[in-house]
Amino acid sequence: MAHPKRRQSTTRRDKRRTHYKIEAPQIAIDKTTGEAHLYHRAYWLDGKMYYRGKVVMEKNQEEEVE
């Protein structure tokens, strides 16, 4: 196995790590409901699943009881 001949300086180490940044997720606000959600993701609101401003799925009342 290869081993480093010399210790890498902290400056060189930190220069490599400058690209490791955390990015804030992009948040969109739906025009029809006004709800904030992630881009390209469906979200639940009042028992209904919305995607691109349209109702995609509704939660069944029978499933909640069981």
Image (cartoon, rainbow, N blue to C red):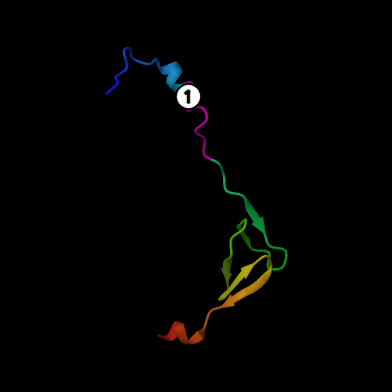
Identify the residue at image location x=52%, y=30%: 19
Between 18 and 4, which is closer to the camera in this rendering?
A: 4
Instruction: Find disc 1 in the rendering and name its residue.
Output: 16
Question: Which residue range is magenta in the image?
Answer: 15-22
The image shows residue 38 at horizontal and vertical percentages of 59, 56
Identify the residue at image location x=49%, y=21%: 15
Quarter occupied by the N terminus: top left
Q: Is residue 65 above or below residue 9?
A: below
Residue 51: quarter of image: bottom right
Going by the numbered disc 1, the residue's amino acid type is Arg
Identify the residue at image location x=39%, y=15%: 9
The image shows residue 42 at horizontal and vertical percentages of 59, 65
Magenta stretch mostly in which secondary structure?
loop
Secondary element type, mark 1 = helix
Identify the residue at image location x=46%, y=22%: 14
The image shows residue 58 at horizontal and vertical percentages of 57, 79
Question: Which residue is outermost to the front?
Answer: 1
Q: Is residue 4 above or below residue 21?
A: above
Question: Which residue is outermost to the right?
Answer: 31
Between 46 and 60, which is closer to the camera in this rendering?
A: 60
Question: Which residue is outermost to the top?
Answer: 6
**Total marks drawn?**
1
The image shows residue 17 at horizontal and vertical percentages of 47, 27
Q: Residues within 10 Å of mark 1 (few under 14, many from 20)?
A: few
Residue 2: quarter of image: top left
Quarter occupied by the C terminus: bottom left
Q: Is residue 19 above or below residue 59?
A: above
Q: Is residue 46 above or below residue 38?
A: below
Residue 32: quarter of image: bottom right
Residue 41 covered by magenta stretch: no
